[in-house]
């Protein structure tokens, strides 16, 4: 039989600390992901994708500002200047 080296509890704790959770997505990334979910729901005629987006809207709305909204519209819709639309919202 081979001898097995046992790790101390201190070594186990340090191993767990090394695991870093992935960074949270930015607000713009979350909006883009929601747009993709809506597109996927429309293409596949699945309402569950739209429901998932609707559940996240409240949290997104609280963090949303005009600059992020403008960037999201301009990134999502090609060839559009969202500045006049965002100015009306203010």
Image (cartoon, grey):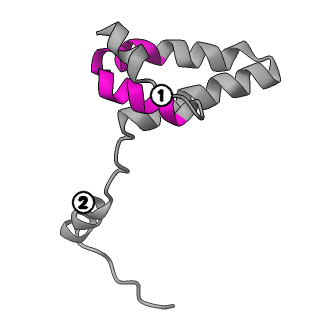
Q: Position of residue 75 (x, y in %)?
A: 51, 36
Q: Position of residue 67 (x, y in %)?
A: 31, 28
* CA neighbours of label 2 inside 10 A, class few (<14), some (14 to 19), many (20+): few
Which quadrant is the C terminus positioned in? Answer: top left
Residue ID for mark 1: 81
Q: Which residues are magenta?
A: 56-75
**Residue at the limit of the structure toward the right, as seen here:** 44
Residue ID for mark 2: 17
Q: Is residue 90 left or right of residue 85?
A: left
Between residue 8 and residue 11, name the one nearer to us: 11
Between residue 17 and residue 31, name the one nearer to us: 31
Which of the 4 image quarters holds residue 86?
Answer: top left
Asked if residue 31 shows in the view, the reply is no
Inter-mark Cα distance, 1 to 2: 46 Å
Q: Position of residue 60 (x, y in %)?
A: 38, 20
Q: Nearer the viewer, mark 1 or mark 2?
A: 1
Q: Residue at x 18, y 68 (%)?
A: 10
Which of the 4 image quarters holds residue 41?
Answer: top right
Asked if residue 2 shows in the view, the reply is yes
Q: Residue at x 38, y 50 (%)?
A: 22
Q: Is residue 84 left or right of residue 79?
A: left
């Amino acid at each position: 039989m081979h001898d097995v080296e046992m790790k101390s509890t201190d070594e186990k704790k340090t191993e767990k600390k090394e695991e870093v959770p992935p960074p949270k997505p930015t607000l713009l990334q979350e909006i883009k992901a929601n747009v993709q979910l809506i597109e996927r729901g429309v293409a596949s005629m699945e309402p569950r994708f739209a429901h998932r987006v609707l559940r996240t809207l409240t949290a997104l709305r609280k963090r949303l500002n005009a600059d992020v909204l403008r960037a999201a519209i301009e990134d999502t819709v090609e060839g559009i200047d969202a500045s006049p639309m965002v100015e009306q919202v203010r």
